[in-house]
Amino acid sequence: MSQIRRQSIISSLMVYVGFALGFFNTYLFTKEGGFTKEQYGLTGIFIALANLMFSFANLGMPSYIFKFYPYYEDNLDKKRNDILTWALLVSLIGFCFVVMGGIYFKDLIIFKFGKNSPEFVNYYYWIFPFGLGLTLYSILESYAWQQKESIFTNFLREVLFRGLTTILIICTFIGWLGKFDLFIKIYSFTYLITALVLLFYLIKKGNLHLTFKASIVTKKYAKKILTLVKFIYGGTLVYAVAGVFDTILLASVSVNGLAAVAVYSLAQNMASLIQAPQRGIISSSIAALSKAWKDKDQQRILNIYKQSSINQLIFAVGMFSLIWLNFEDGIFTFHLQSGYIDAKWVFFFIGLMRIVDMGTGVNAQIISTSTLWKFEFVTGVILLSITLPMNYILTKYYFDVMGPAIANLISFTIYNLIRFWYLQKKFSMQPFTLKSIYTIVLGIISYYLCFYLFDSYHGFAWLVIRSVSFIALYGSGTILLQLSSDIIPVWNTLQKRLGFRS
């Protein structure tokens, strides 16, 4: 677990650096006198549709890499390892079909979005290079994770991509890019730039070799690979559709169009702070889970399951409480446009969803790297069948911008409960202990103590005092209660680095 813990911590720190940049970008997008809500909402639509394009285009290739890379590594030298060749080739073919579909259905898309989100229609074709960049990067990232390069890939996705966005925003403010038109056109190539950086890095490290000759491993496992791809692709596709449907739906049916997307995007970006450790833990545990399934080491899988659950729960509860404690005061203190106060309760429901999703650990990765990948498809279909109609009904007829957040909380809770039940029944694995309950109780107590002490005080200084007080309470409680076995080694190392103990 020490290697996973080290990579998870460094990756999480990298993610938080990226989120700090993302925070800064969000501030620049939403502050008074900056971009309009429609312009900020357009960047949110770009990200949602790029993820949707990748989900259609990848044709199950990331799961193919996650599951079968150990077999390629054990039986082939690097130059004959053809797993990345087929993954890239198949994904590029898949993206060609995405482009053809986008052109064929253009008129329908314009009809659906033209009334409430005309800006999206104006820049429709610029989404395709953005989606291609994300597709290429994600395939290379999946391969790099198997090379134990999760720290660098997290740097690229979280820091470099957001850093490029920051540069574009600043250049727009100081007049170098002129109007928003040039900003969004250059922005559409930022993922392609990120993908090229990763490509050259893998080449320089000697970890990238392309060969179009089918290896003995590919020939031997061809039928199993096709079976895996068929079911995993279906499951991950419907999961991805469920994950971005909310943003796309708001742009289409909300009377506020991209302005509603902007409010929702702000809430999502705030909630993504809760999710930061999840990305580091997933990227660091994938290779270990694949290897453990291959070696039939079920105890190691259970250990990863339990540790990922409690570590993520500690972060999620603490970060959610900290943001909720300061949300409204932060909007007014940093002079964001007044309409963004509507994001408060949207964040509340998205934040709860993140706690549920993170608290259940790496259940999706355990299932997808096992031989039971058919279940991935089944749960994905269940999620989609709940999410789509519930999102539409709650958004169009009841809650508008808050509708998708409520719908996703309900549907993703059901989704994770099914996965929890399945792993418990099939392998007698479940990630929760009494410390899971202690974590939630500690978060609630710390929140209310700080709320009642500082609620009547406002301004930047009180934001800092309120935050420091919460972190001190929650952090000390986490250490004293020893909520995670990973906490004490990290705490001891931190004290040594700071010179507080030898």
Image (cartoon, grey):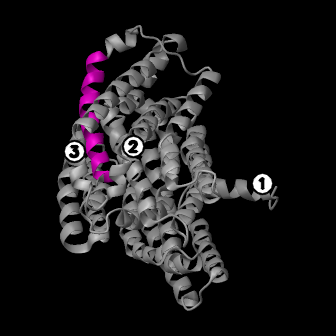
Residue visible at 23% across and 57% down in the picture:
387
110 with respect to 83 (left or right): left
Q: Main secondary structure of the magenta part?
A: helix
106 with respect to 295 (left or right): left
Query: In this rendering, which labeled residue sits more in front, label 3 or label 1?
Result: 3
- Residue 107 marker: 3
Q: Where is residue 251 in the image (x, y as percent from the top left)?
A: 30, 59
Q: Nearer the viewer, residue 447 or 122?
A: 122
**Magenta region, residue range:** 222-244
Q: In which quarter of the image is residue 129?
A: top left
- Classify the position of the N terminus by image quarter: top right
Q: Which of marks 2 and 3 is nearer the N terminus?
A: 3
Residue visible at 49% across and 10% down in the picture:
80
346 with respect to 316 (left or right): left
Residue visible at 47% across and 61% down in the picture:
269
Residue beneath label 1, please? 497
**Distance from Cα at disc 2 to Cα at disc 1:** 46 Å
**Distance from Cα at disc 2 to Cα at disc 3:** 16 Å
Helix, strand, or loop for circle 1?
Answer: helix
- Residue 127 marker: 2
Query: In this rendering, which labeled residue sits more in front, label 2 or label 1?
Result: 2
- Residue 67 marker: none
Classify 425 as above or below 395. Answer: above
CB of mark 2 within 8 Å of CB of mark 1? Answer: no
Q: Which amino acid does label 3 sit on?
A: Asp
Q: Which amino acid does label 2 sit on?
A: Ile
